[in-house]
Amino acid sequence: MLNNVSGTTLTAIFSPEHGVEGTLDTTAVGNTKDATTGVPVYSVYGGTDAARRPSIEVLKTLDIVVIDLQNVGARFYTYETTLGYFLEAAAKAEIPLLVLDRPNPVTGAIVQGPVGDAGHETFTNYFPLPVRHGMTMGELAQMFNEELGIHAKLSVSPMQGWMRGDWFDETGLAWVNPSPNLRNLTEAALYPGVALIEGTNVSVGRGTDTPFEVVGAPWVNSREFAQYLNERSIPGVRFVPVSFTPASSNYSGKLCQGVNLVLLDRNVLDAPELGVELAMAFSKLYPPFRIEPVKDLLVNSAAYEALAAGRDPRRIADDWREALEAFQKTREKYLLYK
């Protein structure tokens, strides 16, 4: 699109996780050329920190960087860190950066989950945000730039007509998969919870037709698991026993038993608390479950230690609300929409 704007020359394209078309599911996202324009495509995704950052030398050849990425509203989705890395690089290269804002698909009105611990920055934890922050990419860019003292020459092109309480299906826009495993809005709504356990030794449905809508493992009893979770009376969601065989990822080609998560009310679901409930259920019922990887996406030592100690998930969630309220006060300064 930019290549067709009068007076504008598209010189470089940068490819984040999942590639420029959002279809790749690998860390092997290499440099290429755009098939339509012949413009060089530089990868900013890979297995090392250096591979995930834009080249300062390339940026110095440009007049401006334009960020146009569809986020999913969860702290650990890597597009947010890619945004932060571009802010840092643009500041160093002394060129302006423009964010073309897009909707937060799971609304900008709901803020949930533990705030990430400061000092534990990773590619899935760029800034101390709650798991579900309720912000757009433009709002996050302003927060990162100011709170981290990056001082990039940042501007944001705001959306027209979007309101904070809008879910994506209320925008009138067509759904385009932000990644190969987020294929609809239901999966996006469940993602900030179910993704908390995807680093463990269970399947979260990758390699099936319904990623993030099913969870399980070969050593799970599906009826027992569903009964336990339903008895927890988790608001907004119910659980149906299911069996499935992933074609890739964890337990590829193996029959798994587990549950199908049925989203009943997306406005009352606390997705991060759901993730803690799932981790606790696996931990209590099935000794093969390995809970340790949950801490990598939870990034909150108090919440993880309470989870590992077997505390009730509702009590764990109560304990993270004070920090969540403090975050919301900071967040207010950067909101662009009512």
Image: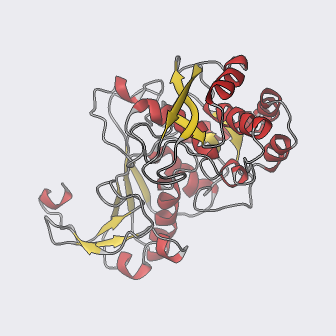
Observer able to see residue 210 = yes
User: How many marks are shown on the rendered structure?
Assistant: 0
Of 133 and 35, which appears nearest the observer? 35
Q: Position of residue 310 (x, y in %)?
A: 85, 37
Q: Position of residue 84 (x, y in %)?
A: 52, 60
Up-down relation of residue 77 to residue 326 (above or below): below
Q: Nearer the viewer, residue 92 or 279?
A: 279
**Quadrant including the N terminus:** bottom left
In the image, residue 189 lies at what x, y percent?
50, 32
**Residue at left offset 69%, top offset 26%:** 224
Which residue sits furthest bottom?
Answer: 57
For the point 44% across and 45% down, the residue is 71
On screen, 168 above or below 139?
above
Inspect this view and state whether residue 134 appears: no
59 sits to left or right of 334: left
Residue nearest the viewer, comparing 275 with 8: 275
Seen in the picture, residue 223 relative to 78 is either above or below; the reply is above
In the image, residue 184 above or below residue 291:
above
For residue 229, which quarter of the picture? top right
